[in-house]
Amino acid sequence: MTRAAPGTRRAVWLAWALQALLVIAVVGGAFWLVHHALETLRARGVRSGFDFLMDPARFEVAEGWLDFEGSQPLWRAFLAGLINTVRASVLAAAISVVLGTLLGIGRLAPHMLVRWLCAIYVQTIRNVPLLLQLLMLYFAITQLLPDSTEAIELVPGVWLSKGGLAMPWPVSEPGTLWPSHLEWPEHGSFSVTGGAALSPEFLAVVLALALYNAAFIAEIVRAGIGSVSAGQKLAAQALGLTPGQQLRIVVLPQALRVIVPSLTNQLLSLTKNSSLAVAVGYPELVSIANTSLNSTGRAFECIAVIMAVYLALSLLISALMNRYNARVALRGWQ
């Protein structure tokens, strides 16, 4: 087992030290800017500071996984909005990656009709503004779908109507940690009750983000597959691999080295674009901050919280994807 040379170890420690100093400088600069802005506001007689986060919110959050009441502090309302942002972004990201991969492969399919259909989807969706698509989807869900009394059963136990999407959901008995059974929604005389209900706002946000970003991911996947040399594909054919095996075993592992860096940027864009959900009334982070701003008047503080949270989310996504990218670049896709 070889040991790194002393000069190499010093270079590594120097690199880490420089990065640490850079982080300290950036954090210190941001802290000074916020402190200076708050002091300027106080000098002008404007109430400022982040103490308002401990005050009662005095408004409700319509939906979310975190139970929240108006008597609870504002920081908990921001937390509820953050959780809503994350759950919409994660689901939209999963759908967009799967759909985008299929579309990207479809754009290279030997069948001309499949190629044309995928190309029409990509060129249409990515050239229409996301906000417009979000509003159109919300209109379609809330206006064109039947009322809750006439909900459509898509598959057994899954109901779709203007009230949203109802589906089975695991529930646990009181005092137990793990779910013990599924609660199935039931269609009654007035509405669908039971199970888990996804609101029209949540559905519109997730579908708009997923469909829009899938068009860009499709082009990323197409470019990644196109970067694999023809010789690799011919070698896979010579080994007798089926087209599906060629794609899964030979092409995609090499294409991922091109796909992942661009995919990281697209996932970052998806997360930040989730802020457009405020247009349809989905209670995510920006919507909660807007309501808090109107009730407290702390505009600078609310905007600072939004910026800090989105920066933290972006850095987390970048760190996770960069770690995966390093793994893919070294050993391929397993």
Image (tube, helix red, strand yellow):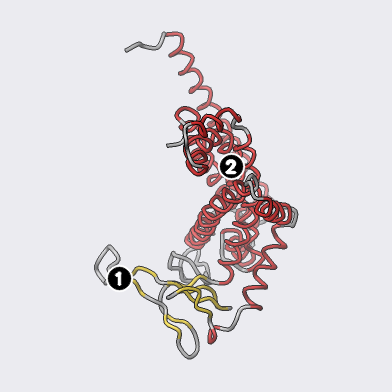
Q: Amino acid at mark 2?
A: Leu
Secondary element at image label 2: helix
Q: Which residue is mark 2?
A: 263
Report whether residue 149 is seen. yes
Give the amino acid type for the residue marked by disc 1 in the picture: His
Q: In which quarter of the view is residue 181 placed? A: bottom left
Q: Quadrant of the C terminus?
A: top left
Q: Residues within 10 Å of mark 1 (few under 14, many from 20)?
A: few
Identify the mark nearer the N-term, 1 or 2.
Answer: 1
Label 2 packing within 10 angstroms: few (<14), some (14-19), many (20+): some
Q: Position of residue 258 (x, y in %)?
A: 59, 34
Q: Is residue 39 visible?
A: no
- Residue 148, given in percent of the width and then of the height, sits at 54, 83
Q: CA distance from mark 1 to mark 2?
A: 37 Å
Q: Which mark is residue 217?
A: none
Examine the rendered structure and indicate whether residue 230 appears above or below residue 61: above
Q: How many marks?
A: 2
Question: Would you place residue 156 above or below residue 17 in this image?
Answer: below
Location of the N terminus (image quadrant) = top left
- Badge 1 is on which residue? 181
Q: What residue sits 26% from the left and 72% below the top?
A: 174
Position in image of residue 299 (x %, y %): 65, 57
Determine the image quadrant of residue 234: top right
Residue at x 29% of width, y 69% of height: 172
Q: Give the residue at the far bottom of this rendering.
A: 189
Q: Is residue 326 left or right of residue 304?
A: left
What element does badge 1 sit on? Answer: strand
**26, 311: nearer the viewer:** 311
Instruction: Residue at 44%, 81% (x, y): give it.
Output: 193
